[in-house]
Amino acid sequence: MSVLALNMVPESWDDNEELEWETSVAAFSFSTPIAPPAPPAPPAAATAAPLAATAPPVKSEAKIQIKNTYTNYPYFLAGVEGSVQRDLFPRTELPLSQLKQSLTTQQGVFNFVQSVRNYIKPLFYVLKSTKYYNPITKTRIPPKTKSEPIDPNFQYISLEDQLKVYRLFGFQGHVGDKKNDEDNKRDELLEKLKNILYNTNTLIVFIELLLIRICVTVEQSDIRLAYEQLRKMSDYEQKSYRLSANWFHDASWKKLRYVYGANRCDNITGGDGGISREMESCILKAATYKK
């Protein structure tokens, strides 16, 4: 084969044709602009369906914690509860069961509130009389003001009732340095009892405390309605000087828990200066202990 034949190039491999093709492609790519994508068409306006009426969320009412302000008198609430049950159901063997059943009616709530108030009323006036007469030492105390002492001649208030009230609240009848302490505590307690008698909110809270003890729930509106009915009665302002005949006291006498400046022995000894059963048992255990 000759050298001329080897150096021959086919027509399809012409450099000029290849250059012209590349030039035309480049010209097309630069001369033809690429259009940006069209924005999406807005959605067709559709008629919105009316929202179904939904009830507003029910706000859960915070449960109010009822504070017991009578913890310093451990037998007070128990005495009220027992005496009221005996007063309302004197002939039944299960007064508590009868009481729970009666509180399901408005009349039963009214009877309960009335009985509680009838118990507190003489308690207030009998305790007030001990400001002028000490039932422990049986001595008369002159009043600090010119006002006449309550029942000074014991025409209505009995010494026995005064002693019951003293034991219920734990007063000892001090005549020495601690007398002023007991006087202050008596004034404080009298204010509490007075509020129960004549303050609507205090009475409602006190009734609820009693209902908590027997695991019964009564609407405040029902208690308030019962109290409003009591206010319209003729004996609402009437004083009372005799304790209930169904007086209930379920424990032995213990001294007042808090007396300003009191010695610790006043809190561990029993009623009337004696040694309590708990203290006596501790002494016996210590005496019989062998190393």
Image (spheres, rainbow, N blue to C red):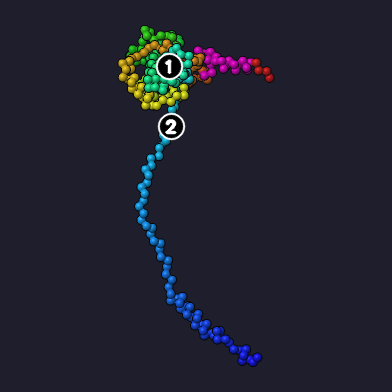
Instruction: Answer whether residue 37 is visible to the viewer in this image.
Output: yes
Q: Amino acid at mark 1?
A: Val
- Residue 77 image position (x, y, % from top left): 45, 20
Structural crowding at the residue carrying mark 1, measured as other residues with C-alpha within 10 Å and reported as few (<14), some (14–19) or many (≥20): many
- Residue 192 image position (x, y, % from top left): 40, 21
Q: Is residue 270 magenta?
A: yes
Q: Amino acid at mark 2?
A: Lys
Q: Is residue 21 magenta?
A: no
- Residue 274 image position (x, y, % from top left): 53, 13
Q: In this image, 288 relative to 144: left or right? A: right
Residue denoted by label 2: 63
Structural crowding at the residue carrying mark 2, measured as other residues with C-alpha within 10 Å and reported as few (<14), some (14–19) or many (≥20): few
Task: Give the residue at x 38% y 18%.
Answer: 111
- Residue 145 image position (x, y, % from top left): 34, 15
Residue denoted by label 1: 84
Magenta stretch, residue numbers: 267-287
Task: Give the residue at x 32% y 17%.
Answer: 233
User: Dot 1 lies on which element?
Assistant: helix
Q: Are marks 2 and 1 in contact (CB under 8 Å)?
A: no
